[in-house]
Image: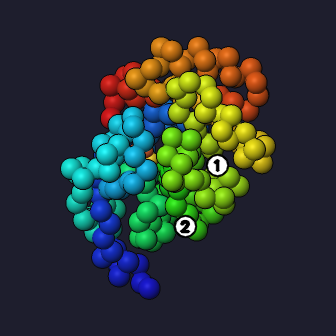
Amino acid sequence: MAVHEKNHFQVPIHETFQSTVQGEGFWVGTLVDFIRLSGCPVQCPWCDTGYSDGGGNTLRELRPFAELLKELKSSRVVISGGEPFIHKQLPNLVQALLDTGRQVNIETSGAFWQELPASTWITLSPKQHISPNYPVQEPFWQRANEIKFVISTGQELDFYKDYLLSSSDRPIFLQPEWHVRDRAIPIILELLQRDPNYRLSLQTHKYIGVL
Ligand code: SF4
């Protein structure tokens, strides 16, 4: 299919913003654009995007690829959500972004799987321990470029210990759940001593008041 035909594809958007800073994980501090896709069924109780109750009242606007491409400003684009992998158009959207010469990152709970171009950076943030109906799809444990755990009690890692054995060749970020960060940061500092692969990730965008 010709590129101009693909650009007529549409995808439900929660919001987009440009020329901001990636606040967490491996690419922290990098100038990026965000495309946040609408919708997520996983229902994490602390979801800061409004999907903890299914997200019936959250933002959703069908927008064509061409419009999304036109507003881009940074050389790296982060696709997040909601849950990006619930959208069948995701591989097409990634390819459309790659075709502009940009790099593409995706953030996912891992509950839904689709094959994407190898150059796509995947951040896996498992939520299976709080939403058991949405287990991480097996291929993600090998495919993810980084794994990020939101830490509240410190017991989250025990739930995934068998999977983490096969993911020991990539960075594993431990990020305090924002609302209990004063309690969680000391727990994470203890956890760092367990494995040299563990790294502290702070949501720096929230500390500096950037979207
Ligand atoms: S997986 Fe992410 S978007 Fe979905 S409910 Fe949990 S925190 Fe929110």
> Front-most of 171 and 158?
158
Residue drawn 30% across the image and 76% down it: 8
Residue 157 vertical position relative to residue 93 in the rendered view, above or below: above
Quadrant holding the N terminus: bottom left
Residue 19 location, x and y as percent? 36, 42
Residue 16 numbered tag: none
Across and down, in percent, residue 203 comes to 46, 28
What is the crowding at mark 1: few (fewer than 14 residues within 10 Å), some, or many (at least 20)? Answer: some
Rounded to the nearest whole Å, what is the CA distance between mark 1 and mark 2?
A: 15 Å
Residue position for label 1: 145
Occupied quadrant, residue 120: bottom right
Task: Give the camera-side residue of 67 and 211.
Answer: 211
Mark 1 and mark 2 lie on one chain; the one further toward the N terminus is: 2
Q: Pointer 2: what residue?
A: 114
Answer with left or right where residue 189 lies relative to residue 36.
Answer: right
Could you say which is closer to the camera, residue 154 or residue 2?
A: 154
Give coordinates of residue 208: x percent, y percent. 37, 22
Q: Quadrant of residue 87?
A: bottom left
Residue at disc 1, CB closer than 8 Å to ligand 1: no
Q: Is residue 151 above or below residue 52?
A: above
Image location (x, y in percent) of residue 211: 33, 35
Mark 1 falls on what kind of element? loop
Amino acid identity at mark 2: Gln
Residue drawn 64% across the image and 17% down it: 189
Is the residue 127 above or below the residue 87 in the image? above
**Looking at the image, in which quadrant does ligand 1 appear?**
top left
Q: Residues within 10 Å of mark 2 (few under 14, many from 20)?
A: some
